[in-house]
Amino acid sequence: IAVARIIDTDTGDHVARLDVSSVIVENDRRQQAIEEIGRDDSVKALVVYINSPGGSTYASERLYKSLRRVAAKKPVVAVIGTVGASGGYMTALAADRIFAGESSITGSIGVIVQLTEFSKLMEKLGVSASSITSGKLKGEPSPFKPLSPEGRENLQDMVSATHEWFVDMVASRRPFSRDKAELLANGGIQIGLVAVKTGLVDELGGFPEARKWL
């Protein structure tokens, strides 16, 4: 876990930096590091550097909530590097101030479930698969058979509910209405120059600007 500390050698007080990079997955060591930062009175602020396209919804939620707990005690600033999109942007939402480079990629507010199904290939190979389930939706989706209409509807309901939850989070953390959050939550991405204008990002800049704001 990349945690750096910029220390005042006279007092021991310091600003901590947490790097969130690559795909976001559940990470107990990262959670523990964040909790320690929140408890440490010598840490006066936290800078979160984000270079991630997102990842697991639950892992992103868990990361967001842990950062919000820190933000309840001390300032938290997010700096988006090359990319901070989807779950990476959700992470940035936990901060009191979001910085991004002019060409940083952000946004991608939305939810996706991707499926792979190879029943046609199995037919060509002469391979079959069967299952015994307790209900018609149990075992869907499956890579061994086409998705049924009921299974598709069930997945769509889940994706839609998760999307609404994400939009609510954006609306609660950014300075614009729920309606605008819904308009921006079309899954599209924006560079930092545009994201500042739409309100997804507060300010253009990196670590120097973040330290200056702090």
Image: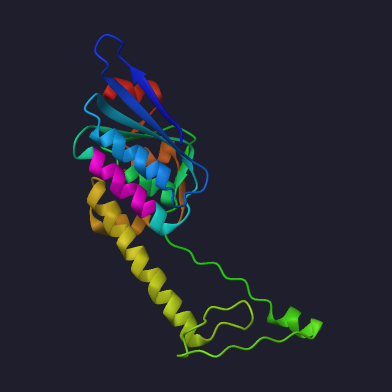
**Quarter occupied by residue 75:** top left
Please tell me whether residue 20 is drawn above or below residue 137 in the rendered image: above
Q: Nearer the viewer, residue 122 or 98?
A: 122
**Quarter occupied by residue 166:** bottom left
Whether residue 200 is visible to the viewer of this picture, yes or no, is no
- The coloring applied to the image is rainbow
The boundaries of the magenta stretch are 60-70
Q: Residue placed farthest to the left in the image?
A: 73
Q: State the image coordinates of residue 152 (x, y, percent, origin top left).
A: 49, 80
Q: Residue at x 50, y 67 (%)?
A: 113
Q: Nearer the viewer, residue 199 or 52?
A: 52
Please tell me whether residue 151 is drawn above or below residue 98 in the rendered image: below
Decide whether the magenta segment is chiefly helix, strand or loop.
helix
Q: State the image coordinates of residue 188 (x, y, percent, origin top left).
A: 46, 54
Q: Residue at x 58, y 78 (%)?
A: 142
Q: State the image coordinates of residue 76 (x, y, percent, origin top left).
A: 28, 34
Q: Residue at x 24, y 13 (%)?
A: 11
**Quarter occupied by residue 135:** bottom left
Q: State the image coordinates of residue 140 (x, y, percent, origin top left).
A: 52, 81
Q: Residue placed farthest to the top in the image?
A: 10
The tally of labels here is 0
Q: Is residue 183 magenta?
A: no
Q: Is residue 66 magenta?
A: yes
